Image (spheres, rainbow, N blue to C red):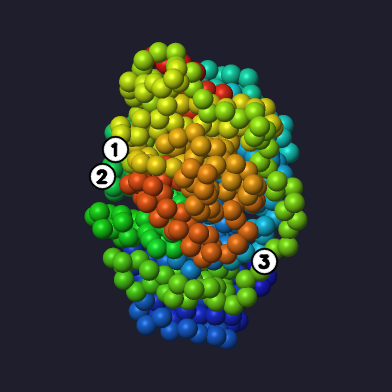
């Protein structure tokens, strides 16, 4: 808003467009709750206090008013829907801004994927800011569909809604000053650089922080969180579908350090978004765990805005964007009205009015599964009596490095269903290289059949795990025929699927449709024996070679702590 228009309204000489009367305003600057009116003109807050006049008034009747919630770290692709559909879920729950890292789609189609995410989120009631993917590919140990160099990122750096550099996963590259990694850090000096340093400690952490990354969302223990806070990092407390860290980390939050903490959802599937919520769910969890409600709101508003230098939002004050949430119970945060840019965009959990649907050509982010099925084999010749096994840790993305006796039949190592040791494969799907990484996994719990998906963080190759080779082949081929998706199969029968034709990551259907498909698929996985809350989310992280401890990529088995390949047979 132009100052010449703003100042007369702020002074009270001219009427505002809208006044929210009789609200209890959450002042995130001071931690106070203040009885006040909020005056709005256009998309801007012009005053917080009594005696403002306006063409329209809404009496809040003493309900609370807080700033619109801001997600510090999210991959929209993990919701399995496009940004417009994602917005329809999260905005009615109070989220008005997200900082997304589109490294999922960038690992598939490169810079085209980033530009697609910016274009398809233009003009939504949800402001979608983008932190540019720092590690595409994540490492040299997996094959992605694209590579983004420092020059590629610099070409995108000044686009509207780009905030900085996203989670810098290449810890060795940063600490050792390796070429490629160092160029990216230097190129973004003076800009926001998010970190990603699970388990990093001591002098390596000192060097990593000094290299530029200033935040971290991978803490799993309070001690890890405190060490990072003491070095000046902002810690994003994560509660996602696969990694639930909030309860473990909340004891580390104190009145002295809370302003250095924020909330991030990272990866949440449709059912969790629709049933539990988004940032509102994290606020409720934190309050239930004993965190002061106003502090919890700070973690989802001002703290995020200040870290990302989003100076126009994150608080209720003159000159700030009029993104506001109205709710009744401080101890049970549930949005009743949501204002985005001064307009009522949601009420009682549902969108209000006509939301824009950006018309974007998505042809360049489709047809992304390229596998020579005739050459594919899951046979593992026996080369010993013991094998390394990836151990699933429920509700976490970290895994265990297990060593188990191999089950051998006719000179081949096969799945041992009775001991929950399933065969696993990661099939390169982008470039038609023919790469296939083969291994074993414990913790998925299948008693029969197989699960497969084109969602495989971060390279997003085709990951499949199962009890027998026939089921695995059926599931994998079905993913290819869909052009990407998630599949459950048994023998030669495809039991169910969720098509994800956009980069093999997102559906082109409404979120409610995807949720129904996903619920059916998880039920099928349960029928096949899996006890996990979301086995497909767990499956999707088994190839992420930057998260400890043992992972499988299309190029082989990776010991993440050694940051190198290790043989399957011990």
Please give the name of the residue rendered at 41% of the width and 81% of the height, measured from the top-left corner.
Answer: 60
Please give the name of the residue rendered at 59% of the width and 46% of the height, measured from the top-left corner.
Answer: 478
Residue 550 visible in this rendered orientation of the protein: no
**Decide: marks 2, 1 in contact (CB < 8 A)?**
yes
Mark 2 Cα shell of 10 Å, populated few (<14), some (14-19), many (≥20):
some
Mark 3 Cα shell of 10 Å, populated few (<14), some (14-19), many (≥20):
some
Classify residue 179 by image quadrant: top right
Disc 1 element = helix
Q: Which mark is residue 251?
A: 2
**Vertical side of 91 occupied by 154: above or below:** above
Along the line of sight, the residue nearer the viewer: 113 or 198: 113
Disc 2 element = helix
Residue picked out by circle 3 = 357
Please give the name of the residue rendered at 31% of the width and 34% of the height, measured from the top-left corner.
Answer: 418
Q: Which mark is residue 561?
A: none
Q: Which mark is residue 222?
A: 1
Along the line of sight, the residue nearer the viewer: 12 or 504: 504
Q: Where residue 192 appears, x then y in whole percent?
A: 56, 40
Whichever of callouts 2 and 1 sits on the residue coming sooner in the sequence is 1
Along the line of sight, the residue nearer the viewer: 450 or 370: 450
Whichever of callouts 3 and 1 sits on the residue coming sooner in the sequence is 1
Kindly report the distance in space between the C-alpha atoms of the residues bearing marks 2 and 3. 42 Å
Please give the name of the residue rendered at 52% of the width and 49% of the height, measured from the top-left corner.
Answer: 494
**Vertical side of 354 occupied by 444: above or below:** above
**Vertical side of 289 occupied by 223: above or below:** above
Q: Where residue 185 appears, x then y in whole percent?
A: 59, 29
Residue furthest left in the image: 290
**Decide: marks 3, 1 in contact (CB < 8 A)?**
no
Q: Is residue 309 left or right of residue 254?
A: right
Disc 3 element = loop
Whichever of callouts 2 and 3 sits on the residue coming sooner in the sequence is 2
């Amino acid at each position: 808003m132009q100052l010449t228009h703003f100042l007369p309204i702020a002074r009270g000489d001219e009427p505002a467009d809208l006044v929210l009367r009789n609200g209890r305003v959450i002042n995130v600057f001071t931690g106070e709750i203040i009885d006040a009116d909020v005056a709005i003109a256009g998309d801007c807050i012009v005053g917080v206090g009594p005696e403002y006049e306006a063409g329209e008034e809404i009496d809040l009747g003493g309900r609370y008013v807080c700033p619109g919630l801001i997600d510090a770290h999210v991959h929209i692709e993990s919701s399995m829907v496009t940004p417009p559909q994602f917005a329809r879920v999260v905005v009615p729950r109070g989220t008005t801004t997200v900082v997304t890292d589109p490294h999922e789609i960038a690992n598939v189609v490169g810079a085209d994927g980033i530009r697609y995410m910016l274009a398809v989120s233009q003009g939504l009631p949800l402001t979608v800011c983008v932190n540019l993917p720092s590690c595409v590919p994540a490492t040299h140990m997996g094959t992605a569909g694209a590579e983004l160099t420092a020059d590629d990122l610099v070409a995108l750096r000044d686009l509207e809604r780009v905030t900085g550099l996203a989670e810098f996963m290449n810890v060795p590259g940063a600490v050792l000053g390796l070429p490629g990694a160092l160029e990216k850090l230097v190129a973004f000096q003076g800009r926001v650089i998010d970190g990603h340093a699970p388990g990093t400690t001591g002098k390596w952490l000192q060097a990593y922080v000094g290299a530029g990354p200033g935040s971290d969302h991978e803490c799993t223990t309070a001690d890890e969180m405190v060490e990072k806070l003491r070095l000046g990092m902002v810690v994003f407390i994560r509660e996602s579908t696969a990694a639930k860290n909030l309860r473990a980390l909340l004891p580390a939050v104190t009145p002295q350090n809370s302003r250095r903490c924020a909330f991030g959802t990272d990866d949440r599937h449709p059912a969790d978004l629709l049933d539990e919520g988004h940032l509102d769910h994290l606020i409720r969890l934190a309050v239930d765990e004993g965190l002061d409600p106003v502090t919890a709101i700070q973690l989802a508003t001002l703290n995020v805005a200040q870290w990302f230098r989003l100076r126009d939002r994150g608080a209720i004050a003159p000159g700030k964007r009029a993104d506001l949430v109205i709710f009744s119970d401080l101890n049970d945060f549930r949005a009743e009205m949501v204002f985005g840019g001064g307009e009522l965009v949601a009420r009682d959990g549902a969108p209000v009015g006509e939301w824009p649907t950006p018309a974007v050509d998505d042809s360049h982010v489709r047809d992304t599964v390229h596998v020579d099925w005739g050459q594919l084999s899951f046979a593992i010749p026996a080369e010993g009596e013991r094998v390394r096994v990836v151990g699933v840790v429920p509700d976490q993305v970290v895994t265990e490095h297990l060593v188990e006796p191999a089950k051998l039949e006719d000179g081949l190592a096969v799945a041992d269903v009775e001991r929950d040791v399933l065969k696993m494969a990661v099939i390169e799907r982008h470039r038609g290289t023919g790469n296939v990484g083969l291994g074993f996994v414990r913790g998925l719990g299948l008693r029969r059949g197989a699960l497969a998906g084109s969602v495989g963080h971060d390279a997003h190759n085709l990951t499949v795990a199962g009890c027998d080779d026939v089921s695995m082949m059926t599931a994998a081929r079905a993913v290819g025929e869909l052009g990407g998706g998630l599949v459950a199969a048994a023998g030669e029968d495809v039991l169910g699927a969720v098509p994800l034709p956009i980069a093999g990551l997102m559906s082109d259907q409404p979120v409610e449709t995807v949720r129904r498909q996903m619920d059916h698929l998880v039920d099928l996985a349960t029928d096949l024996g899996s006890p996990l809350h979301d086995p497909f989310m767990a499956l999707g992280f088994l190839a992420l070679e930057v998260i400890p401890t043992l992972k499988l990529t299309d190029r082989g088995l990776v010991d993440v702590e050694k940051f190198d390949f290790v043989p399957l047979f011990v």
